[in-house]
Amino acid sequence: MDVRQPNPQAHTPTGADSADSAAVAVVVLRWPEEDARRRWLAAAGIPRILVLPAEQPPPSHWDHIEDWVREPVDPEELEVRRVTVALRRSMEQGRRTPVELPQPDGAPGPRA
């Protein structure tokens, strides 16, 4: 994908309702390998989650619509962080966006 023109909807995580136009797309990318893409997405105000190698220090700066996880990635942790970042972005935009909340049993949960 061209770093200058990402399509956030192409990165809507599994479990997000892509038919819901109010859904907030959160891009998951590898860091530091995809740092140029990360910077472009940050400038565009697109929420991000960085996946870091186990021994890689996190970036020295990040904003409120970015978070990070270490490899090996726990899918439940990734989903919680995705929901959190999406809600932050939604609140920033002055609206309450429907987001699937993760449930301990893996079943679809209520929307926030």
Image: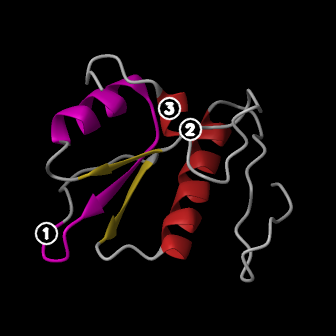
Q: Residue at x 74, y 75 (%)?
A: 103
Q: Is residue 76 above or below residue 39?
A: below
From the image, tell me which residue sits under label 1: 56
Instruction: Please report contact status of discs 1 and 3: CB closer than 8 Å, yes or no.
Output: no
> Disc 1 or disc 3, which is closer to the eye?
3
Image side of residue 87 versus residue 19, left or right:
left
Residue lying furthest right: 110
Measure the alpha-carbon separation of dots 2 and 3: 9 Å
Residue at 21% from the left image edge and 63% from the top image edge: 58
Query: Residue 36's x, y, as percent?
Result: 17, 33
Which mark is drawn over residue 25? Answer: 2
Q: Quadrant of the C terminus?
A: bottom right
19 relative to 86, above or below:
above
Looking at the image, tell me whether mark 1 or mark 3 is earlier in sequence order: 3
- Res 10 label: 3
Write the start and end of the magenta stretch as one range. Answer: 35-57
Which amino acid does the dot numbered 1 rest on? Gln
